[in-house]
Image: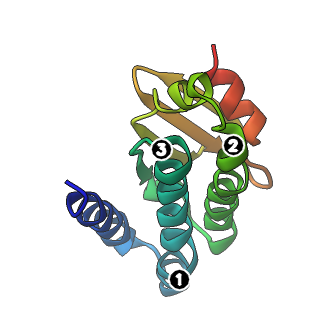
Amino acid sequence: MKNKIPLLLVATLSLAVASLAHAGKAERDFFAAEVAPALKTAASTLKQSCGCDVKMDVKQDSFQTVDHLRQVRYAAGTIVDNAPRYCNDAPSKAAVCQLKTLEFARTGTTAFKFAAGKGAITLDESSYPSWDMLAAELDK
């Protein structure tokens, strides 16, 4: 099972990169060089710190510029920076591990919503949800 997790992560990220086919070269290059590795690090941090496998999904059609994609990288970074500190006890790990899929989309509104195992991070032009926003929603 240990070998299936990296393979699943690679397959998921490959699909995300393939769906950027309509974006320009700058956006595809930025996604491959910056966003995909940030998502991979966020997923592995959640696995290592909290003990859960979370599938990361980016709604590519909502991100049209490198600046838009940069917000995804920043949002992934907030997970990397905060999950190890947050998942320091069983109840906190259980709260985070309700999350099975985390979707990123640019909607013009910064928010985090969670229902039935799926989290949705929505981004605007210049901000992304803080870790506190994610934790508050998952800890309900």
- Which mark is nearer the camera, 2 or 1? 1
User: Where residue 71 sits: x, y (%)?
Assistant: 68, 59
- Which mark is nearer the camera, 2 or 3? 3
- Of 25 and 79, nearer the camera is 79
Q: Classify mark 1: residues with Cα within 10 Å, few (<14), some (14-19) or many (20+).
A: few
Q: Residue furthest front?
A: 89
Q: Seen in the image, is 35 located left or right of residue 136?
A: left
The residue under the point 65% across, 57% down is: 80
On screen, 117 above or below 68? above
User: Where residue 30 sits: x, y (%)?
Assistant: 56, 80
Element type at mark 3? strand
Element type at mark 2? loop
| Residue carrying label 2 | 108
Dot 2 or dot 1: first in sequence order is 1
| Residue carrying label 3 | 103
Q: Classify mark 3: residues with Cα within 10 Å, few (<14), some (14-19) or many (20+).
A: some
Dot 2 or dot 3: first in sequence order is 3
Label 2, label 3: how many angstroms apart (C-alpha)?
A: 15 Å
Q: Classify mark 2: residues with Cα within 10 Å, few (<14), some (14-19) or many (20+).
A: few
Q: Amino acid at mark 2?
A: Gly
Q: Seen in the image, is 124 located left or right of residue 98?
A: right
Dot 3 or dot 1: first in sequence order is 1
The residue under the point 33% across, 65% down is: 19
Q: Amino acid at mark 1?
A: Ala
Label 3, label 1: how many angstroms apart (C-alpha)?
A: 19 Å
Q: Are marks 3 and 1 in contact (CB under 8 Å)?
A: no
Q: Are marks 2 and 1 in contact (CB under 8 Å)?
A: no
On screen, 110 above or below 95? below
User: Where residue 133 sits: x, y (%)?
Assistant: 73, 32
Q: Amino acid at mark 3?
A: Glu
Quarter-of-image position of residue 125: bottom right
